[in-house]
């Protein structure tokens, strides 16, 4: 299969490139390289590398692919709030346009990287794909509005699907520590304490970034009718945690680290526990490879291997919003 992956040099993308190549597929990667120099390990090279904005892809560049995997985005809540206009231009209008162009170019399958953050302030626990959506950030709005628009494009020749990923964690060659698990473990590793910015009660579904990549591979290889125009939560029922539970798991690895509540963000309105039953119906037999606990052990070993330091934790390299502030012109120029 020939797949085109946007955003293949971000946090999740390197796992996607490697897994697809290992499965014998040919990968075209498209990335603006916003975070390329943030990588702490070599990134896998796609079979065809396009260093450009996905919004400038031509029909010629898209045609001939069997599947587009659309990861590229301004990719979290705080960043979306910092640059709301850019979030809508890039994540929403850019994504709708890419789906349109992919369809016109004859690409039969389009997999969109969505997010469980569309549930926002969860109205009840165990939210499934039919639950009311309560997006409370520009980022979450961009994800759900894209889903709605691309849904209308589905037909006999174009099979989109929407992977609503849980919050990612774990090791990647292009690490981020602005995600709750990685952040709490990194903080304990360099500061000797675990700083929780909320009151620790909000629920979050969590999934290893490599398991997200495995889900994309499964959706790309699945029969068309299994995935056709479906929005599917990506994660596992057992992997919903309250932030304070995550802190307890960190403490198991670093028993001397004290848990400190900084109350920096007050009550966190983002609170959702998610049901993942549909995933096993759509992709029978799909199981996560990692739990938060095993993913943390792996990342802990990587912190030791890379001598992860306080400078690393406090610097720009592993925090998307700090790096992005210096890169906004790259995205603006392309609007
Ligand atoms: N990390 C998570 O917790 C998580 C959870 C759910 C969903 N997602 C979604 O998965 C996708 C990938 O997430 P990530 O954590 O790897 O993000 P990331 O920010 O680490 O990587 C995004 C990549 O996209 C590229 N990019 C951004 N805009 C571009 C453009 N216009 N043209 C070309 N390249 C562009 C960046 O250079 C970067 O390499 C995103 O759509 C994100 O919203 C992530």
Image (cartoon, grey):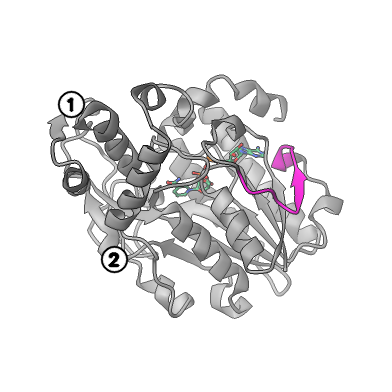
Residue nearest the viewer, comparing 134 with 39: 39
99 displayed left or right of 274: right
Q: Is residue 98 above or below residue 225?
A: above
Q: Residue 18 placed where, x, y %?
A: 60, 57
Does the rendering let one see residue 20?
yes
Quarter-wise, where is residue 135 in the image?
Answer: top left
Disc with the residue nearer the chain's start (1 vs 2): 2
Quarter-wise, where is residue 197 in the image?
Answer: top left
Q: Residue 40 placed where, x, y %?
A: 51, 36
Identify the element where label 2 is drawn.
helix
Q: Residue 216 placed where, x, y %?
A: 55, 62
Q: Mark 1 points at which residue?
A: 262
Most prominent secondary structure in the magenta stretch?
loop
The residue segment tinted magenta is: 43-55
Ligand 1 falls in which quarter?
top right
Numbered circles on residues, count: 2
Q: Distance between the residues labelled 1 and 2?
A: 29 Å
Residue at the location (17% across, 40% down)?
A: 200
Q: Which mark is residue 205?
A: none
Q: Mark 2 points at which residue?
A: 237
């Amino acid at each position: 299969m020939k797949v085109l992956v946007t955003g293949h040099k971000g946090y999740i993308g390197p796992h996607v490139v490697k897994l697809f190549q290992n499965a014998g597929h040919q990968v075209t990667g498209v990335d603006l390289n916003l975070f390329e120099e943030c990588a702490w390990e070599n990134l896998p090279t796609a079979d065809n590398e396009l260093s450009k904005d996905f919004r400038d892809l031509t029909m010629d560049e898209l045609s001939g692919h069997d599947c587009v995997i659309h990861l590229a985005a301004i990719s979290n809540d705080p960043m979306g709030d910092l640059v709301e206009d850019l979030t809508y231009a890039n994540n929403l209008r850019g994504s709708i346009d890419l789906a349109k162009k992919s369809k016109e170019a004859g690409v039969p399958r389009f997999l969109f990287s969505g997010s469980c953050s569309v549930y926002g302030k969860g109205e009840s626990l165990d939210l499934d794909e039919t639950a009311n959506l309560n997006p409370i950030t520009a980022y979450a709005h961009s994800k759900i509005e894209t889903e709605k628009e691309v849904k209308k494009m589905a037909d006999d020749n174009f099979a989109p699907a929407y992977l609503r990923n849980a919050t990612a964690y774990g090791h990647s060659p292009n690490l981020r520590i602005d995600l709750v698990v990685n952040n709490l473990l990194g903080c304990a590793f360099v500061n000797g304490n675990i700083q929780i910015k909320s009151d620790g009660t909000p629920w979050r579904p969590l999934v290893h970034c490599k398991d997200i990549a495995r889900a994309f591979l499964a959706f790309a290889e699945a029969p068309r009718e299994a995935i056709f125009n479906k929005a599917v939560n990506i994660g596992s029922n057992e992997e919903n945690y309250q932030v304070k539970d995550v802190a307890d798991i960190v403490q198991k690895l670093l028993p001397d680290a004290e848990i400190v509540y900084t109350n920096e963000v007050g009550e966190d309105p983002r609170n959702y526990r998610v049901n993942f039953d549909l995933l096993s119906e759509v992709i029978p037999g799909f199981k996560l490879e990692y739990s938060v606990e095993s993913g943390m052990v792996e990342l802990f070993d990587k912190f030791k291997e890379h001598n992860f330091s306080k400078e690393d934790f406090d610097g720009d390299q592993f925090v998307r919003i700090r790096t992005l502030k210096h890169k906004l012109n790259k995205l603006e120029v392309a609007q």
